[in-house]
Image (cartoon, rainbow, N blue to C red):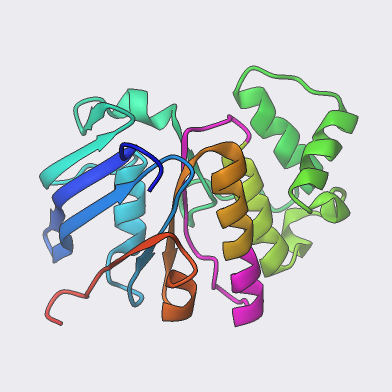
Amino acid sequence: MTGQPYMAAHGLELKTLAGYAYKGVDLEASRGELVAVRGRNGSGKTALLLTLAGRMKSTGGTLAVGGFELPRQRAKVERKVGLGIFAGLNELQESLTAVYAVGAEFELFGRKPKREQVLAYMRAWEIDDIANVRIKDISAEKMAQLGIALAFVGEPEAVVIDDIEDQLTMSQSEGLMTMLHRAAREQRAAIVVGVVERGLADMADAKVFLAKEGE
């Protein structure tokens, strides 16, 4: 741990008409720390990650992020927590090139960097080799890296990432975990990542297990 938790959830739950998406979650994440949320597909990982980021409203328990209480202060939390790419939420237009997508993300934060500056940013995240590649033609591994890079454009204090295993080998996923671990330290960000494999969760500083309802 690296000080007081930036994110602190206690007894957190989300109940829907179909049952609980997740229930009884206790999680703490400090700045500079990588925390893994492990669970099988359908265990509620994505819903929990979006709740931590202030993009989804919980129905029970308590959650504080950066000193703000959720869901009451969701708008303030959203500005401090970066998102990786989440299917159905912030997917990129397939016809765009990667460099255009990154540049557009900078503009969302009121910055208009030159192309050379955008390329330098992409180089730091090891994705400058796909700068001129259209989103639809980018490999799954590079798309995951691009999603991580986009999440950090606004210099957030925390970041949530999902799907670092989708269509990837274990070795590729381990590489992404190493990248996230380094980013947590260098960017002083609290990072929470959703994973399925135990080996990936073991690479994090701390981990939380989510069981599917009924398990």
Query: Left of 9 or right of it: where is 132?
Result: right
Please state the horizontal and vertical placement of residue 123, each as a whole percent of the image: 82, 46
Query: Left of 14 or right of it: where is 103?
Result: right
Tag count: 0
Hey, which quadrant is residue 213 in on the image? bottom left
Hey, which quadrant is residue 166 in on the image? bottom right
Residue at 87% x, 30% y is: 115
Q: Which residues are magenta?
A: 153-176
Residue at 41% x, 43% y is: 2
Asked if residue 108 is positioned above or below residue 100 in the image, the reply reads above
- Magenta run includes residue 168: yes
Whether residue 92 can be seen here:
no
Q: Quadrant of the C terminus?
A: bottom left
Identity of the residue furthest to the top in this view: 110
Given residues 101 and 28, the one toward you in this image is 28
Please state the horizontal and vertical placement of residue 80, each as a whole percent of the image: 44, 29
Query: Left of 98 or right of it: where is 49?
Result: left
Whether residue 128 can be seen here:
yes
Asked if residue 95 is positioned above or below residue 39 in the image, the reply reads above
Given residues 40 and 104, the one toward you in this image is 40
Please state the horizontal and vertical placement of residue 82, each as a whole percent of the image: 49, 39
Given residues 159 and 42, the one toward you in this image is 159
Given residues 138 and 23, the one toward you in this image is 23
Please state the horizontal and vertical placement of residue 100, each as a whole percent of the image: 78, 38
- Magenta run includes residue 17: no
Asked if residue 63 is positioned above or below residue 147 in the image, the reply reads above
Residue at 67% x, 24% y is: 107
Residue at 22% x, 74% y is: 211
